[in-house]
Image: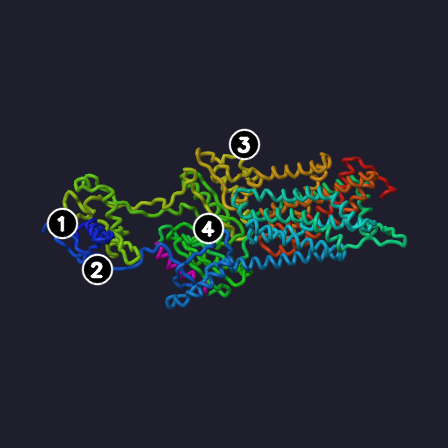
């Protein structure tokens, strides 16, 4: 009112402030040999001087000069409203995010950071404490130390198995070669820029059993040759000459089995890429050391056969032991009853396929980090100060729990990404997130459920969702539904279906609920007469309510914005809207906006609108309360599709009766937009973990045929035979028997890591089959009868194949304790165990079938 009386507009104040805060340098002049800047005085040195600023008015006295303090209250403060809050254990905090440089060592960075913070601690203001919200150095150190222990355990297990089953000398030789291979792998990892982290170290444990395969074949071959009387050098030449190329081909095939993940272009491939690099380096080194270092060690440390008095070698049947005799008799019977043997194998495979359908599905497992977080979505339109007050109640509750160590509260969204698998939310005043830290992660499952239930009861007006960190890519809810189209009612129908499920939680959509909005109705005629347009009206309301930037105050090296707005009392009352002053060029004075608006209406509008490919898209997020997301998805998916009227006839190409809807549920791929029946132009698609899994699988599906084709080609090149290639590849599906049994026994889901383990099994089994088929060719090439050649080959390869499988299986034991690798470890352990037993029997039987090898009783 006083501004209107004096004829001072907001623009007059803005102009005066802006002029006062222009850059000080106004010119330069030459004075002799010097070049001097001209800086006039009058700039502000304190915000208290703002009140002495003279503003020229346009009132009755020909524009009097008025002090700014006469028409405004001036104070210094923080931004209002605050855009975000951060608290640590209920105390206000300032967050500082520090990242390691590209290619840097996070442990070195963490140690240097700790030293620097200790140096700066004495400079910190009194009462300030420094605490870590998330320190990756600790997590990485713990993970690496755990994996180094697992690696040492795995190496110890492998060496112990070799010592027990292959003797002291052979076991020590192969163990020494294994150590050389591992150390060489570390060297080449360093040269190739492959860092030590969970994936790369886990890959080394996975490859550990395979690393000794080649050395076992060479060592066992030389041992048998030397027992038969050959000297070490001759034995080395013969063994390496016989198995060198087949082992190289088998090694390349094992590497190719992992290559699909190494070339996958999606985020999952990026996350697991070092797995392939470590497998590639270590397996190639294992072949190199098998044909070089292993023969050297054998020649140096292995004894040759004893000699008689005449100097001739005392030959002894190396395959005369009880284990060999039992296996020989069993294999002979299996070949004689070949069709019964194959029928039993097919029956076991059929049972495995049936059991495979009962496995749970998951993408990536949850993390074992001693932290979890809670999302709070208050009704849209909630003021951030109200959100802040509500969070104080949640903090008090959580800090009162016995197992909770620290509570970090983030209000308003937009926090830094402190973990690869953590995705910050956009800025919402009604959103808050609490990070809960515990001492022992084993307490999280019980605490997780307890806090979810208690906080839902404490905040019935909010959407509360407790969430665990995952060991893989993750964004938003575990389950997501996208509806392409602007109709909100479709989203409400889908949400109603999800909310009806008692095991669903955190149900929300990205458009949020509609919010109230006040709409001043511009009176066009009066506004035109006053010389006021809609932009001027909007600017006046914004300046009065939120405030408008009126300039920048330069204080030393700080630039502080100057905001001009109405007093708080006027901004808090809707009745004052009509009294907001606006400059009228026609009247030459300030007038209330009530003179240019016909009234104020309250309406509802969407606070956020999302688009996908330029089409309006409503996305719904929700999670499961317990179990795996796939269980909840399988329950609500057909109901939602039916409720929204998915055009099943168009998708399946045939009519479907309503009573058979569940059986006709659509297998939706992530990139498919499924049309709705009665709403042309509307589509739905499933996202979240389902989409991520399908993306990863599709990405692998694009490269798997290439590398599996390469694997088949390598087998054909090795043997130059379609029959032998077919025999080898027919053994690969047998791994499914053990995989199904293992996953069901350990109650593990079949996810991405299990799929990767299944792919790697193919390479391992093919490698074993190649060694066996190659030995059959060698035996037949020496002139033996076909049946005897098949039997002798199986017997001679019993120990190398069994030891290779046994070391791989037992080397996986340490990974059973790791949440990320357990499903993959179980897949490889049980798949390889069952398939190896079957391979030692089925491959010779299939060879006998394909090449019509007749049973010879006298050779059995």
Residue 618 magenta-drawn?
Answer: no
Q: Where residue 138 sits: x, y (%)?
A: 52, 60
728 vs 377, left or right, is right
Query: Residue tagged by mark 3?
Result: 655
Give the numbered dot on residue 593.
Answer: none
Classify mark 3: helix, strand or loop.
Answer: loop
- Give the mark nearest the N terminus, 3 or 1: 1
Alpha carbon of mark 4 to alpha carbon of mark 3: how far?
A: 42 Å
The alpha-carbon separation of the residues under discs 3 and 2 comes to 80 Å
Q: Position of residue 384 (x, y in %)?
A: 36, 55
Q: Which range of residues does the magenta coloring cover?
A: 383-399
N-terminal label among 1 and 2: 2
What is the magenta segment's predominant secondary structure? helix
Which residue is at the front of the view, 172 or 411? 172
Crowding at dot 1, Cα within 10 Å, few <14 / some 14-19 / many 20+, comes out as: many
Q: Name the residue under label 4.
A: 423
384 within the magenta span: yes
Q: Mark 2: which secondary structure? A: helix
Q: SS of the residue at dot 1?
A: loop
Q: Mark 1 points at which residue?
A: 58
Please state which of residues 597 and 57 is positioned toward the viewer in this rendering: 57
Disc on the earlier residue, 1 or 4: 1
Residue 325 in sight in this render: no
């Amino acid at each position: 009112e006083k501004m209107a009386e004096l004829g001072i507009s907001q623009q007059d104040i803005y102009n005066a402030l802006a002029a006062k805060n222009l850059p000080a340098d106004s010119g330069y002049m030459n004075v002799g040999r010097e070049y001097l800047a001209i800086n006039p005085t009058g700039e502000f040195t304190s915000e208290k001087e703002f009140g002495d600023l003279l503003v020229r008015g346009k009132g009755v006295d020909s524009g009097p000069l008025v002090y700014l303090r006469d028409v405004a209250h001036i104070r210094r403060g923080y931004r209002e409203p605050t855009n975000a809050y951060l608290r640590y254990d209920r105390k206000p905090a300032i967050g500082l995010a520090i990242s390691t440089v590209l290619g840097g060592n996070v442990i070195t960075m963490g140690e240097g950071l700790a030293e620097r913070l200790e140096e700066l601690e004495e400079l910190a203001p009194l009462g300030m404490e420094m605490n870590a919200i998330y320190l990756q150095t600790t997590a990485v150190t713990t993970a690496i130390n755990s994996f180094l222990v697992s690696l040492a355990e795995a190496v110890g297990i492998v060496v112990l198995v070799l010592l027990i089953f292959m003797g002291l000398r052979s076991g020590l030789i192969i163990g020494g070669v294994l150590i050389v291979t591992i150390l060489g792998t570390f060297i080449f990892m360093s040269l190739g820029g492959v860092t030590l982290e969970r994936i790369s170290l886990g890959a080394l444990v996975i490859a550990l059993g395979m690393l000794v395969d080649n050395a076992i074949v060479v060592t066992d071959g030389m041992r048998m040759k030397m027992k038969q009387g050959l000297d070490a050098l001759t034995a080395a030449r013969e063994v390496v000459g016989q198995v060198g190329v087949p082992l190289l081909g088998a090694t390349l095939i094992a590497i190719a089995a992992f290559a699909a993940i190494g070339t996958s272009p999606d985020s999952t491939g990026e996350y697991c890429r070092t797995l392939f690099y470590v497998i590639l380096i270590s397996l190639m080194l294992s072949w190199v050391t098998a044909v070089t270092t292993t023969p050297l060690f054998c020649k140096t440390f292995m004894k040759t056969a004893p000699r008689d008095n005449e100097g001739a070698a005392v030959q002894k049947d190396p395959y005369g032991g009880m284990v060999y005799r039992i296996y020989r008799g069993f294999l002979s019977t299996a070949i004689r009853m070949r069709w019964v043997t194959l029928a039993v194998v097919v029956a076991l495979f059929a049972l495995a396929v049936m059991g495979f359908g009962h496995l749970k599905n998951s993408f990536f497992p949850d993390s074992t980090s001693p932290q979890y977080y809670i999302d709070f979505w208050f009704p849209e339109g909630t003021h951030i100060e109200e959100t802040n007050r509500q969070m104080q109640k949640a903090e008090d509750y959580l800090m009162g729990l016995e197992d909770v160590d620290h509570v970090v509260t983030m209000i308003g969204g937009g926090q830094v990404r402190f973990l690869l698998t953590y995705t910050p939310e956009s800025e919402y005043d009604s959103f808050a997130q609490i990070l809960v830290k515990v001492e022992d992660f084993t307490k999280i499952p019980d605490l997780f459920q307890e806090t979810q239930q208690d906080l839902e009861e404490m905040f019935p007006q909010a959407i509360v969702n407790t969430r665990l960190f995952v060991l893989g890519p993750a964004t938003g809810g575990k389950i997501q539904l996208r509806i392409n189209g602007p109709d909100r009612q479709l989203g409400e129908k889908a949400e109603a279906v999800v909310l009806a499920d008692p095991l669903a939680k955190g149900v929300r959509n990205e458009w949020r609920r509609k919010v109230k909005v006040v709409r001043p109705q511009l009176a066009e005629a009066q506004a035109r007469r006053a010389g006021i347009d809609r932009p001027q009206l909007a600017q006046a309301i914004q300046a009065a309510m939120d405030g408008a930037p009126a300039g920048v105050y330069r204080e030393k090296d700080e630039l502080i914005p100057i905001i001009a707005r109405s007093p708080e009392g006027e901004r808090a009352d809707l009745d004052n809207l009509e009294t907001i002053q606006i400059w009228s060029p026609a009247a030459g004075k300030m007038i209330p906006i009530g003179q240019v608006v016909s009234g104020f209406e309250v309406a509802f509008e969407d606070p956020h609108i999302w688009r996908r490919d330029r089409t309006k898209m409503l996305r719904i997020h929700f999670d499961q309360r317990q179990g795996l997301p796939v269980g909840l998805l399988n329950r609500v998916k057909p109901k939602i599709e039916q409720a929204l009227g998915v055009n099943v006839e168009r998708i399946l190409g045939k009519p479907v009766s309503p009573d058979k809807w569940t059986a006709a549920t659509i297998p939706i791929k992530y990139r498919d937009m499924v049309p709705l029946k009665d709403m042309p132009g509307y589509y739905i698609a499933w996202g979240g973990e389902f989409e991520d899994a399908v993306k990863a699988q599709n990405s692998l599906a694009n490269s798997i045929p290439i590398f599996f084709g390469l694997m088949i080609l390598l087998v054909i090149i090795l043997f130059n035979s379609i029959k032998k290639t077919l025999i080898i590849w027919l053994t690969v599906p047998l791994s499914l028997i053990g995989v199904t049994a293992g996953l069901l026994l350990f109650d593990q889901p079949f996810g991405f890591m299990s799929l990767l383990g299944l792919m790697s099994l193919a390479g391992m089994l093919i490698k074993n089959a190649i060694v066996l088929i190659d030995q059959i060719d060698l035996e037949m090439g020496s002139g033996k009868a076909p049946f005897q050649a098949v039997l002798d080959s199986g017997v001679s390869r019993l120990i190398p194949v069994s030891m290779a499988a046994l070391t791989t299986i037992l080397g996986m034991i340490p990974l059973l304790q790791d949440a990320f690798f357990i499903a993959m470890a179980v897949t490889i352990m049980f798949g390889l165990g069952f398939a190896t037993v079957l391979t030692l029997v089925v491959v010779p039987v299939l060879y006998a079938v394909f090449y019509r090898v007749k049973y010879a009783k006298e050779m059995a």
